[in-house]
Image (spheres, rainbow, N blue to C red):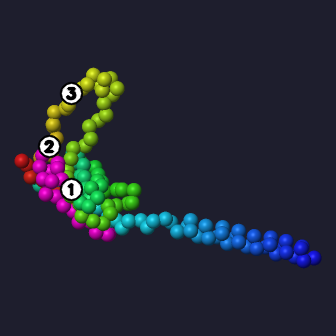
Amino acid sequence: RSATFMIAHTNRLVKYYSLLVCCSLAIAGCSGGPPKPVVGDVTGKVTLDGSPFGDGRVVFKDSTTAIEAVAELKPDGTFQVVTPDGGLQVGKYDVAVQSPPPAPLSPMEASKGVPEAADTSKIPKIYRDFATSGFKAAVASGKNNFDFEMKPQ
C-alpha cells in the first residue's frame, strides 16, 4: 500500500511541477519581449521658393545612431514618415531633401555599362546633404509637423 501511495503522490507532484513550468513559460512568453520605442507621428511639407516641391524624398538621420528614415514627397510637397515602429523614434534628426532613387537598370543596360545620368534634379545641392542643408528636426511623442523651405541656389 505505501508503495502505491508513493507512486501516486510522485505522479501528482510531477503533474503539479509540469503545470507550474508550463504556466511560467506561458507568462514569460506573453510579456511581449523588449518594450517598443517611443515614437512620434511625423508629417510636413517641402517647398522651393515658396512653391510646393514634390519631386524627391525627405531623409531623416538620427543624430545619435545615424539610422535613416525616408519619406517620399507627394506632388503637393507633403510627406509622412512611416517606419516599422509606426513613426520616428523620439530624438534629434538631421534632415536632407534628396532625389528619388534611380530606376533599376535592365540586365541589358547593366551589361552595357550605361554611363552615369546627368544631374537633372531641381533640388539645390546644399539641401541634399545633411551637413549643409541646415534642416533639423526634434521629434517628440505625439504629432510632429516639420516644414522645410528650400531657396534656389
| Residue at (27, 65) in percent of width and height | 91
Instruction: Give the Cα distance between marks 2 and 3.
Output: 21 Å
| Residue corresponding to mark 2 | 122
- Residue 144 vs residue 13: left or right? left
Q: Give the tally of numbered discs.
A: 3
- Residue 93 vs residue 123: left or right? right
Residue 64 painted magenta: no
Which badge, 2 or 3, comes first in the chain's sequence? 3
Q: Residue furthest right?
A: 1
| Callout 1 amino acid | Val
- Can you give x and y, in whole percent of width and height, for residue 77 in the image? 22, 52
Q: Quadrant of the N terminus?
A: bottom right
Q: Secondary structure at mark 3?
A: loop
Q: Secondary structure at mark 1?
A: strand
Q: Which mark is residue 115?
A: 3
Residue 106, relative to residue 123: is it above or below? above
Q: Specify whether residue 48 is in view.
A: no
| Callout 3 amino acid | Pro
Badge 3 crowding class, 10 Å Cα cut-off, few under 14, some 14 to 19, many 20 or more, is few
Span of residues in magenta:
125-145
Residue 141 painted magenta: yes
Question: As rendered, which of 118 and 6 lies closer to the eye?
Answer: 6
Residue 51, relative to residue 38: is it above or below? above
Which-is-in-front pick, marks 1 and 2? 1
Q: Specify whether residue 36 is in view.
A: yes
Which badge, 1 or 3, comes first in the chain's sequence? 1
| Residue corresponding to mark 1 | 95
